[in-house]
Amino acid sequence: MARLQLCLLSGLTAAGLGSQSLANAQDIHAKQAISQRDAFTTTAAYVVQFYPLWFTYYQSKIANTNRIAGPDRISPIYHIVVAINDDTLYGSSFLDLMAQPMILKVPATTAAYSVLTLDPFGDIFESGIPSQPPGTSLPATTYALTGPGFAGVLPAGVTPIAMPLDFSELIFRADKFSPSGEDQIAQASQFRAGLFTQPLCAYLNQPCPAGVPAGGTALIVPEIATAAPFKTAADALIAKDPITFLKQLQTAVAAPNTPPLSPAEQALSDHFDSLFGDGNNFNGNAKKNEFIAGAQAAHDLILENYLTHTGTTNWIHFTNIGAWGDHVIDRASITEFIQYGNGISTAAYYHTFRDGRGFPLDGSSPHGYVLTFPNGGQPEASRFWSVTAYTPDSIELIDNPANKYVVASYTPGLQTNTDGSLSIYMTRTLPDGVPPANWLPISRRPFNIMLRVYGVVPSSTVADDTYVPPGIDKIR
């Protein structure tokens, strides 16, 4: 937040509204100008600080609570979360432990999987529910997830998991292929279907309080249920109706599932509320324009912070996902582009909208593009690395006749070049002489590419942040 505050303070000083101007403001017009700039700066800070809550609060209104669910397939229809991968099977649930602990039964499987727990801001915390790396086998386990206010006694035979919050999200990702390329979709599907939840009262065959979610076996839902486009909805609201966005964000901040705010966060929220009210009583007041400008400036900053966070070959890479410290602008940016991303010990994400020379990636280029890893230059991963193409605005999969969305270390038939390098071709149609496994389809429009590394190897170049993916080359 310090970075945003510095930008806004510079803007105030440049506008002649710094501390000296404030001290000298004697007439009503100057005071009105000061009030309007306060509305701008407070709104901008408010949006950046609390941006993730808009997403998680409204996603929780249409998603399951205390019952694992996942889509029956992944395709360009999927929009509820940005940058979905096609490497794993997802099972997730919002958690509400306020009224009752939740029993979670996790079956045994041979498929590798990871477990991610986050608060509504996107901050990652370790729950104690273990992930299963490749080549290991965890026993089937029954967990009891308790909220911070639970003071009861758990039954024998369950593994207690003391969650730090009553409200959070739990995400399982089960690998569809082994690191050696063995198809494990059946095992991953069976694992996901075997995830089971129920309230403690039901587990004990006791009456449950009214309104407590019943839980049950994992729901495999039609993909159309995941089509709500949250990212583009937020983008459009801020561009066209920012006052409505601010009202909705205000509702999310005040919601009971928002974690307890720090004193600084509470002060910002209270000050915004005192200026904005309920957002319905501006009556042509010029201050309304400052709320609009503040929301849009914050959104511009969120986008700019992400899109300019590039390295020497134009790949965007953050190492602080889920562990932001005071870099709340990074937290907002990741919500916009990689919501629910894993922490760096589990996965690394490299994202680019530009080729190695700095020009935007555009599928209208007649010959397409190629990404070539030199011999030994593929990222080290204990699970997999993969390359996926996305649409420019929604950051979702690109529709293509081949229904192919990923090229990965596990892709059957992936071929290296004679010098040991590996090339992935990003084109509208399969180029002559290119193995189908090495082809990543794109469409005739701008696109972007994400390189994922799942299973970050300790002490590897990915882990120590010295790995730099090669630039993408335009084929001429």
Image (spheres, rainbow, N blue to C red):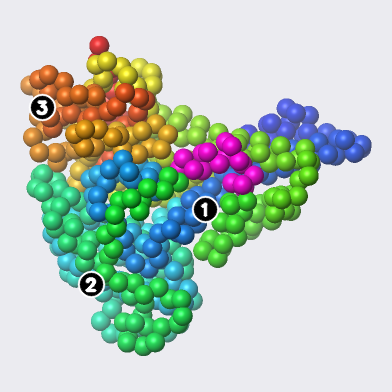
Mark number, residue 223: none
* Residue 264 visible somewhere in the drawing: no
Q: Find residue 71 and report its image quarter.
A: bottom left
Work out which quarter of the rendered image holds the N terminus and state it. Answer: top right
Q: Which residue is mark 1?
A: 53
Q: Going from the N terminus, do you reach mark 2 or mark 3 first? A: 2
Instruction: Name the residue located 28 percent from the left edge and 35 percent from the top edge.
Output: 399
In this rendering, is residue 33 above or below 128?
Answer: above
User: Residues at badges 3 and 1 in contact (C-beta under 8 Å)?
Assistant: no
Q: Amino acid at mark 2?
A: Thr
Residue 144, compared with residue 17, is above or below; it is: below
Q: Which residue is mark 3?
A: 435
Instruction: Name the mark nearer the viewer: 2 or 3.
Output: 3
In-image side of 424 versus 394 (left or right): left
Between 435 and 409, the one lying in front of the other is 435
Write down the region rendered in magenta: 231-246
Label 3 element class: loop
Q: CA distance from mark 1 to mark 2?
A: 32 Å
How much space separates mark 2 and mark 3, taking CA atoms? 43 Å
Instruction: Identify the residue position indicated by label 2 in the image.
Output: 141
